[in-house]
Image: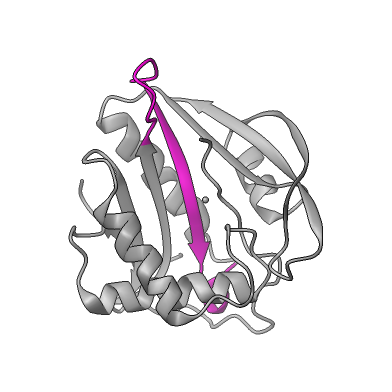
Amino acid sequence: MAPVRGACVGAVACVHFPSQPHPHPRPRVTPIVITPLPRPAADPDIRALAELLRDAVQSGAAVSFLATLTVAEAEAWWRNAIATAHPNAVFLVAREEGRIVGTVQVHPAWAPNQPHRMDLAKLLVHREVRQGGIGSRLMVAAEEAARAAGYTLLTLDCKRGGAAERLYRKLGWTFVGIIPNFAVDPDGVTPHDDALFYKPL
């Protein structure tokens, strides 16, 4: 898949935008380039992805982890996720001057009777560069990757009522329903509901 270029710029997958953007996002003066992550991933990319995941969790994202997540734990999670992923899975990264500032992934459904479906997971954008369209571009690139691979249906879920839900509705995803008290926030205490979405390709 060719790089996507432009000047702006976690069964069902768990996908959430952090609820607390950086108070002073950096003005963007360099282009964002979106490409598939090479597999196996290089150590610097693993470290960058680990920091990106920790940034998301520390800013309130509901992406399966608690605020106690360490860099070592995040690196181990990424290494395992990439190493054990289906051969058709796609990990996309958004880079600014080589630095990873965003990511998303799509995975084929495990069930043999769902060969047409992929789960979209772990949409993350660093606090410093949010509100600049990177999340939307990652989503579009993920949809294009799934379509190019022959898949016809995407599914995801997100914390109810957040920026992620608004983004998915804006991008044409169909809301299915709510699972009450699905998980807790990174504080390990506060429960939240889960919103389910799908999108035909």
**Could you say where residue 17 lies in the image, as x and y percent from the top left?**
61, 59
Q: Is residue 114 above or below residue 99?
A: above
Residue extending farthest top:
113
Residue 36 vs residue 27: left or right? left
At 39% across and 49% down in the image, what residue appears? 105
Q: How many callouts does the rendering have?
A: 0
Judged left or right of residue 180, residue 66 is left
Coloration of the structure image: one colour
Q: Position of residue 38 (x, y in %)?
A: 19, 60
Does the magenta run of residues contain 118? yes
Magenta residues span: 108-130
* Residue at the spot 37% in from the left edge and 73% down from the top edge: 75
State the residue in front, 20 or 1.
20
Residue 91 counted in the magenta span? no
**As rendered, which of 45 and 102 lies closer to the eye?**
45
In which quadrant of the rendered view does residue 174 lie? top right
Q: Is residue 52 left or right of residue 92?
A: right
Q: Which of the 4 image quadrants contains residue 86?
A: top left
* Residue at 61% over, 33% down: 197
Please name whichever residue, 193 or 134, is drawn nearer the observer in this view of the structure: 193
> Residue 100 at x, y = what percent?
36, 72
Q: Is residue 4 visible?
A: no
- Residue 193 coordinates in the image, percent (x, y): 77, 45
Q: Quadrant of the C terminus?
A: top left
Q: Is residue 47 left or right of residue 200?
A: left
What residue lies at 52% left-to-right and 75% top-to-bottom?
Answer: 54
Question: Is residue 143 among the parts visible in the rendering?
Answer: yes
Q: Quadrant of residue 119?
A: top left
